């Protein structure tokens, strides 16, 4: 039995005991038939747990007393009104009308019995029974509706809390994914550039220390830039600020960085460049950065072509590089390519990988008036 049901039963049992004790005190004060009233009060213990059973027991006891004593029972008959109220308030939906029907039936029986037994009066008792039964049933029905409204509000509150918790979890997941993408883009690009320059620097150091010096300076600069990016990223997370302020305005610096790593990049721009929103601006920059990083890591020849085609509706960015050949391997659907797809999907864009004589990463970015992403 559930704890709530046990508590309800305990409260109603205490109420029944109090009424029984009250009937006993009335009997000591001289009230006749007090024991009948006490007997009728006993079913109050199941008033809310089994209201229909209580109503049946009260009806049987009250009817038996009426046949035996040819009189009404006070205060026992008042328990019948409590039983009718309990059925209307706590019985199942299909049985909530049983109390009213039983009250109407009792009123008719009493009215008919009164016609043969003048000690009960005329038809007035039947009218009173019907009126009080209707009042008790209506009150129970109102209480039922109020409890239903409270339960509905409580369910809505719980659903709202669950929805809020789910939204918070989704926000945390999205934030973690965004931070993960940023960390990958920063570290992967910087390490690829450092590794490529370090390999060149090792060869240059053996041949000419004068040439190797500036090369190692660039390696140190790339490392410092990566460290600064990571610190800025973590600071932005702590302050709940925008994670990055970079965008296509940083593209020349990016091309200089990859050129220092040994990657030759040719750039073609078609159409009139349009301003982008901060989110899309960063996403396009990171996609170009990741594409060029993949070329550094995987392409057999360190060369790439970047094409940016602007139209009023769509920005198309394509990065092509030599396909698989001796000493190279094709980029796979790893974390980098997955990050490119995720960034595109955030702005209703698309990513296409094309393999052939050249390997191409093509991303499309829908534009609207003012450069705000859809």
Image (cartoon, rainbow, N blue to C red):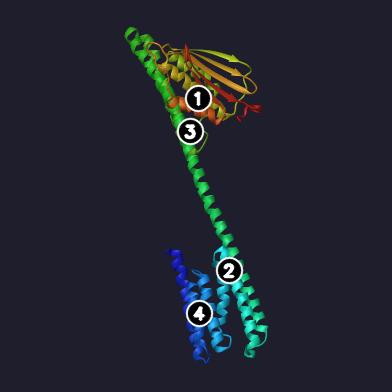
Q: Secondary structure at mark 1?
A: helix
Q: Closer to the camera: disc 1 or disc 4?
A: 4
Q: CA distance from mark 3 to mark 1?
A: 12 Å
> In the visual, does 330 lie left or right of 207?
right
Of the numbered discs in the image, which one, if any, rests on residue 88?
2
Q: Closer to the camera: disc 2 or disc 3?
A: 2
Sequence-first disc among 2 and 3: 2
Q: Position of residue 242 (x, y in %)?
A: 52, 34
Q: CA distance from mark 2 to mark 4?
A: 19 Å
**Quarter of the figure that contains the N terminus:** bottom left
The residue indicated by pointer 3 is 178
Answer few, some or many: residues within 10 Å of disc 2's Cα (few below 14, many 20 plus, some between 14 and 19). many
Q: CA distance from mark 1 to mark 4?
A: 79 Å
**163 or 74: nearer the eye?**
74
Sequence-first disc among 3 and 4: 4
Q: Position of residue 256 (x, y in %)?
A: 48, 16
Q: Is residue 177 above or below residue 334?
A: below
Q: Secondary structure at mark 3?
A: helix
Sequence-first disc among 2 and 4: 4
> Would you say residue 256 is visible in this rendering?
yes
Residue that lies at the very extreme toward the bottom in this rendered image: 30
Q: Are marks 3 and 1 in contact (CB under 8 Å)?
A: no
**163 or 112: nearer the eye?**
112
Q: Are marks 3 and 4 in contact (CB under 8 Å)?
A: no
Q: CA distance from mark 2 to mark 3?
A: 57 Å
**Quarter of the figure that contains the C terminus:** top right
Answer few, some or many: residues within 10 Å of disc 4's Cα (few below 14, many 20 plus, some between 14 and 19). many
The residue indicated by pointer 1 is 286
Of the numbered discs in the image, which one, if any, rests on residue 41?
4
């Amino acid at each position: 039995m559930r704890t709530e049901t046990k508590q309800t039963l305990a409260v109603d049992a205490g109420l029944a005991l109090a009424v029984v004790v009250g009937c006993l005190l009335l009997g000591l004060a001289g009230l006749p038939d007090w024991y009948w009233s006490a007997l009728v009060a006993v079913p109050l213990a199941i008033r809310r747990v089994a209201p229909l059973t209580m109503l049946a027991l009260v009806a049987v006891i009250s009817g038996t007393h009426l046949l035996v004593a040819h009189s009404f029972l006070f205060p026992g008959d008042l328990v019948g009104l409590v039983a009718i109220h309990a059925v209307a308030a706590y019985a199942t939906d299909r049985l909530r009308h049983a109390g009213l029907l039983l009250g109407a039936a009792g009123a008719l029986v009493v009215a008919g019995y009164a016609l043969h037994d003048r000690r009960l009066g005329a038809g007035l008792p039947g009218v009173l029974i019907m009126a009080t039964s209707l009042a008790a049933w209506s009150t129970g029905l109102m209480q039922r509706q109020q409890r239903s409204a409270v339960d509905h509000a409580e369910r809505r509150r719980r659903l709202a809390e669950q929805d809020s918790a789910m939204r918070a979890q989704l926000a945390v997941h999205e934030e973690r994914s965004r931070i993960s993408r940023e960390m990958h883009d920063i570290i992967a690009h910087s390490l690829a550039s450092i590794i490529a320059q370090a390999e060149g620097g090792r060869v240059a150091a053996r041949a000419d220390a004068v040439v190797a010096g500036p090369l190692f300076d660039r390696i140190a600069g790339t490392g410092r830039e990566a460290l600064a990016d990571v610190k800025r990223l973590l600071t932005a997370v702590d302050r709940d600020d925008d994670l990055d302020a970079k965008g296509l305005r940083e593209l020349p610096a990016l091309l200089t960085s990859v050129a220092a790593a040994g990657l030759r990049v040719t750039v073609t721009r078609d159409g009139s460049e349009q301003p982008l929103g901060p989110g899309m601006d960063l996403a396009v920059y990171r996609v170009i950065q990741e594409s060029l990083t993949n070329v550094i890591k995987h392409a057999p020849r360190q060369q790439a072509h970047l094409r940016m085609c602007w139209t009023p509706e769509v920005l198309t960015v394509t990065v092509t590089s030599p396909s698989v050949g001796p000493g190279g391997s094709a980029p796979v659907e790893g974390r980098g390519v997955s990050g490119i797809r995720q960034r595109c999907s955030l702005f209703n864009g698309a990513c296409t990988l094309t393999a052939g004589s050249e390997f191409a990463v093509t991303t499309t970015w829908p534009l609207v008036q003012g450069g705000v992403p859809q």
